Amino acid sequence: MKKRHLAAPPTPDLAESSRTGYQCPKSGWWLAREDPGDARFITKGDVMPASGGGPVLWIMKATADMQYPGPATPLQASSLA
């Protein structure tokens, strides 16, 4: 019998990065290299933000079509008020 292999989940280009002040090259979840706890969803074309009051290198963690494998306790909308 022929073995079936499940398709691997899509993974972002691990070389994808951008710096504060530049346009975002791809929509998705980005982590600040200088502050790995700072994960943000940034849309393609938006200006990459600063983090911790200064410029940083942003590393793509997950593309927009992937579920972000972030912290176990996501930020609740009610805590933003």
Image (tube, rainbow, N blue to C red):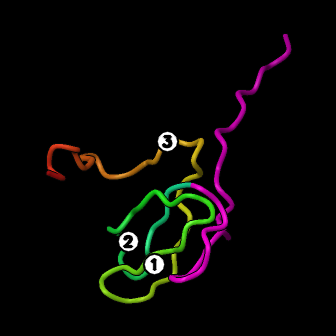
| Residue holding disc 3 | 67
Q: Secondary structure at mark 3?
A: loop
Question: SS class of the residue under badge 2?
Answer: strand
Which is nearer the eye, 68 or 46? 46
Magenta stretch, main secondary structure, is loop
The disc placed on residue 36 is 2
**Is residue 81 within the magenta segment?**
no
Q: Which mark is residue 33?
A: 1
Asked if 28 appears above or below 1 in the picture, the reply is below
**Quarter of the figure with the N terminus:** top right
What whole-number distance in Å separates the C-alpha atoms at marks 2 and 3?
18 Å
Kindly identify the amino acid type of the residue bearing the numbered disc 2: Pro
Instruction: Identify the residue at image location x=31%, y=86%.
Output: 53
Q: Secondary structure at mark 1?
A: loop
**Which labelled disc corresponds to residue 72?**
none
Percent x, y of residue 30: 49, 64
Amino acid type of the residue that numbered disc 3 sits on in the rendered structure: Gln
Labels 3 and 1: the sequence-earlier one: 1
Where, by quadrant of the figure, is residue 65 drawn?
top right
Residue that appears at 60% across and 68% down: 24
In the image, what residue type sits under mark 1? Arg
> Along the polypeptide, which appears first: circle 2 or circle 3?
2
Residue closest to the far right: 2
Which of the 4 image quarters holds residue 4?
Answer: top right
- Picture coordinates of residue 47, whole percent (x, y): 54, 73
Tags 2 and 1 in contact by the CB under 8 Å rule? yes
Q: Nearer the viewer, residue 24 or 7?
A: 24
